[in-house]
Amino acid sequence: MLALAGYPLDLDFVFLDPAVEACAAPLGDHLHADYGDQAMLARFCQACDLATYEFENVPAAVAEFVAERIALYPPPQALAAGQDRLGEKRLFDRLRIPVPRYLPVAAREALELAARNIGLPAVLKTRRMGYDGKGQALLRAEQDLDAAWQRLGGQTLLLEAFVPFERELSCLAARGRDGDMVFYPVVENVHRDGILRTSEPRRDDPLQAQAEDYTRRVAEHLDYVGVMAFEFFVAGGQLHANEIAPRVHNSGHWTIEGAETSQFENHLRAIAGLPLGSTALRGHCVMFNLIGAPPDNIAMARVPGLHIHHYGKTPKPQRKVGHATLTAETPEALAARRALIEPLIP
């Protein structure tokens, strides 16, 4: 989707991806290699003027290797900040951004002490490599500790107080090389089984200014360039930081049809030193993730205002294989069309 947004800007692309069937491969030169393959990384750097990433589990050492040779945005320190949940929480603390209570956990006994200190329910998380609900365990009672430790123990962990949230919001922002920032309307997200299911931008949300303030604090601290997503829990009418994603984000895919400038185009504008585009809404919209297997294309295509994006991925349970964005000119029309599309999406 970055490449699709970049071709109208006269940009060409080289992709380094360890996947044999990389989704982006048809849109540029695909260098098939592990991230740690320095010979291939050097070849990648020779072929590019600048680089970016759209996956925060790229090893930090790889980002440093690339940044020593060509411009890399977002900068390596942003990637490092998004890779370690403990470091991320401490960053939020330093920037005076509210965050659920948390404690590092390095041993089974430490988990018991942390659970007593924080209280239950709480969420045990791996500090690294978790996404889409992976690497997490909800602890509702003491008897849940053993099973959670057996599943997640043996790696660095974090215990975090469970937030009885009213809503989940994300704030999407783009920051240019010159420090200019633009913000999209905050997005209300719905998850199921730890996987994002729907995202809907909210006009005039009362928490917009607060979300922008917290996102700006992080972006300026990290000297960020590109698009960043900041995920929040809303509890008691206030924002509580969950995590940042130093990249274009699933909760912003609606921007392709729903905003004047998509998050993908704004990311490319930011890293290439171009002026940032307008983030204004074009109308009303909601995005649905397609999980496991894509629904019936013909039935979906009959729904007015629906834009379908298939990623070319092999269907697997709990795997995101595409998304669909539903658009309309009015809230009433969107609701009517949504009633048509929701029965078609598992």
Image (cartoon, rainbow, N blue to C red):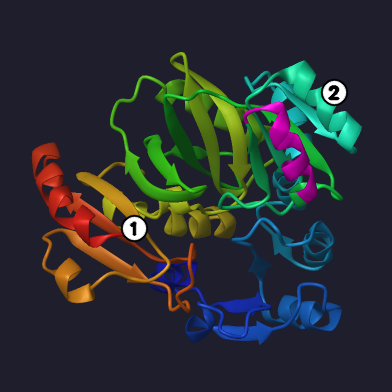
Describe residue 207's horizontal placement relative to residue 295 as left or right. Answer: right
Q: In what element is the residue under mark 2?
A: helix
Q: Nearer the viewer, residue 198 or 148?
A: 148
The picture places residue 285, in percent across and down from the top left corner, at 24, 47
The picture places residue 157, in percent across and down from the top left corner, at 80, 41
Which stretch appears magenta? 140-150
Query: Identity of the amino acid at label 1?
Result: Ile
Question: Residue at 56% of width from left, 46% of height from top?
Answer: 176
Q: Nearer the viewer, residue 133 or 271?
A: 133
The first of marks 2 and 1 along the sequence is 2
- On screen, residue 196 above or below 170: below
| Residue 12 shows in the view | yes
Q: Which residue is mark 1?
A: 256
Question: Residue at 68% of width from left, 81% of height from top?
Answer: 47
Q: Which residue is mark 2?
A: 113
Question: Residue at 56% of width from left, 79% of height from top?
Answer: 22
**Quarter holding the N terminus?**
bottom left
Query: Identity of the amino acid at label 2?
Result: Leu
Describe residue 175's horizontal placement relative to residue 159 as left or right. Answer: left
Q: Is residue 47 magenta?
A: no
Query: Within 10 Å of the Cα at label 2, are there few (<14), some (14-19), or many (20+) other Cα atoms?
Result: few
Describe residue 119's horizontal placement relative to residue 203 as left or right. Answer: right
The picture places residue 38, in percent across and down from the top left corner, at 85, 77
